[in-house]
Amino acid sequence: MKTRLIYFIFAGLLLNLSSCMVGPKFSAPETDNPEVFANDNIEGDSTVSLEWFEVLGDSILINLIDSALSNNKNLLMAASRIEQSRAYLGFTKADMYPSFGYTFESQGANFNPNTGAKSDFNMHMGGASVNWEIDFWGKFRRSNQAARADLVADEFAKEWIKLTLISDVVEAYFQLLDYDRRVEISQRTLDSRTESLEIIGKKFYRGVSPELDYNQSQIQQAMAAQAVPLYKRQVAITENRLSILLGQNPGPIIRERNTNLTIDSVNIPVGLPSELLLRRADVQEAMQQLKAQNARIGVAQAMRFPSISLTGVLGVVSNDLSTLFDNGGIYQVSGGLLGPIFQFGKNKRRVEMEREKTNQLRLQYEQTVLVAFQEVENALISVNTLKEEYKAITDQVEAAKSAANLSNKRYDGGVTSFLEVLDSERSYFNSEITASEVSMQRLSAYVLLYKSLGGGWKIPEELIEE
């Protein structure tokens, strides 16, 4: 009995070792991409830290990022999906090995089922069983390959969610500081125009200034008054958006007011290699999804061939429970072959479906790479042009401020009309608001570049040519 069971196990191992795997081998798709980025002409140091926003020296921002990485719900769900995929990998791996079980059966009758004669009949049987479907065609191994690739894809998906979360938090924080500055600019302008309105009002009632000057001053004061609640509303909305990213209820964000972040200390190396994009988590995720789907073609092809199974039982049997272990052991060994013959093309169509799904994911991978290049090029263009734009708008602010001061002096001296004062003050206010917006856009462009390059622009050692 033991010898037969040893033969049984040996036969299963032999079939597994001599088996083959049907289905195509995976090969990474080749993409026709440039070696470097077209708009990367910024001089700088290639050793910049990947966490470039740390050089801004804003401890509040760093704390916000840490809080988001600990509490963001989307990131926590991504971590849970990884654990689910890891469990499923173990689930599919178990199919490649024999399954062991136990059985106990008890029968009683007033006739003998073997002879048909009427007499008391009792039988009690208990034992252990083993069942093994031999993975001769690689169905279970291909399924395990797919599960493993799905697990890796989920890990890359988590990394991409993490990177996106960091970028979203930083960008929302920059937007919040922008709206803080706009509120401060609007409030300062409102206070100034309210003071001017009082002065012109007194002149009007004394008959020194015309009513038109008084009305124009009222309009300008009302416009500034309208801007204050507008930007306060944007502050509250941005605080709520940032709170959700932090995984907490909407509410105020504690921060220092009038923080002036500069980007001049951050540089980008010239000649960034396009291979940087290959490390992007979403690109790697798309690659692993393609790899998993490619393995499922093998699963579908294996289902077109017969399955080979071995079954064995080892136990004891007796007509009386009291003598169940007195009659020695019993065993049963069997093998089976089950396969399709004619199913109207169902199995063939299953393979075709999996092939088309694989083709779709191959195209999805290529599209992901194309979009990645687009995002990098757009970010590089933005970094380049916004630097020039910010320089121009800051010059405009200084000129507008000087013009506003001179116009007020000329008006007080009776040299010019109040219309000149209104025009210069309006230009000064608009240029300050625009400067705040461009400053935020410039910071956001670096955030986009950080994200589009998959986590920064430091060139890995393996990509540096000797």
Image (tube, helix red, strand yellow):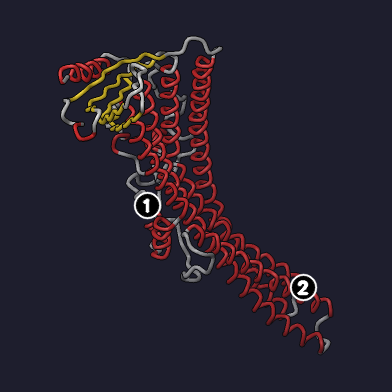
Judge whether residue 400 can be spotted in this image: yes
- The crowding category of the residue bearing disc 2, from other C-alpha atoms within 10 Å (few below 14, some 14 to 19, many at least 20), is some
* Location of residue 239 (image quadrant): bottom right
Q: Residue at x 30, y 32 (%)?
A: 103
Judge whether residue 398 can be spotted in this image: no
- Kindly give the residue lying farthest to the front in the view shown: 118
- The residue lying toward the viewer, choosing from 321 and 10, is 321
> Which residue matches tag 2?
219
Instruction: Give x and y (percent) for residue 325.
Output: 17, 31
At label 2, the amino acid type is: Ile
Task: Tell me if label 2 and label 1 are in contact, CB under 8 Å.
Answer: no
- Identify the element where label 2 is drawn: helix
Image quadrant holding the C terminus, namely top left
Question: Which label sits in the foreground, 2 or 1?
Answer: 1
* Location of residue 273 (image quadrant): top left
At label 1, the amino acid type is: Glu
Horizontal side, residue 442 vs residue 336: left or right: right
> Which residue matches tag 1?
51
Instruction: Give x and y (percent) for residue 263.
Output: 45, 56
Horizontal side, residue 457 vs residue 404: left or right: left
Instruction: Give x and y (percent) for residue 445.
Output: 51, 49
Q: CA distance from mark 2 to mark 1?
A: 47 Å
